[in-house]
Amino acid sequence: MLQMITIELNGTKQPLPIGSAVSDLLSIIGSDGKSVAVVVNEQIIRPDKRSARLLQEGDHVELLIFAGGG
């Protein structure tokens, strides 16, 4: 059986497999990651660091979506 952790994603509880990185989270929720900024525990995670940043039980993750305007 797969071991799980629970993080808080934009204020909602989100279960993830243990060992999930930020990039895994983006895949799970169906985001290509190109138009979002990722903040974990108030720290911005740069796109080139997302596959190395493992998520832990209780982490607070905010996804900020860039919106174009005119």
Image (spheres, grey):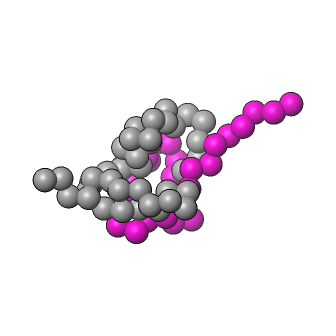
The dominant secondary structure in magenta is loop
Residue at horizontal 45 percent and vertical 35 percent from the top: 30
Q: Residue at x 55, y 34 (%)?
A: 34
46 or 61, which is in the foreground? 61
| Quadrant showing the C terminus | top right
- Number of numbered discs on residues: 0
Where residue 49 appears, as percent x and y from the top left, is: 44, 47
Q: Quadrant of residue 59?
A: bottom left
Seen in the picture, residue 21 relative to 68 is either above or below; the reply is below
Q: Position of residue 24 (x, y in %)?
A: 36, 43
Q: Residue furthest bottom?
A: 58
As drawn, 37 above or below 10: above
| Image position of 16 (left or right of 11) | left
Whether residue 67 appears in magenta in the rendering, the answer is yes
> What residue lies at 50% left-to-right and 42% top-to-bottom?
47
Q: Is residue 12 visible?
A: yes
Q: Is residue 44 left or right of residue 50?
A: right
Task: State which region is magenta.
Answer: 41-70
In the drawing, does residue 24 fall left or right of residue 38? left
Q: Position of residue 11 (x, y in %)?
A: 55, 62
**x, y percentage for residue 12?**
50, 59
- Rendered residue at 35%/67% (across/down): 57
Q: Quadrant of residue 29?
A: top left
Left or right of 23 on screen, residue 42: right
Closer to the camera in the image, 50 or 69: 69
Q: Is residue 19 magenta?
A: no
Q: Residue furthest left?
A: 1
**Residue 51 in view of the camera:** no
- State the residue in front, 35 or 48: 35
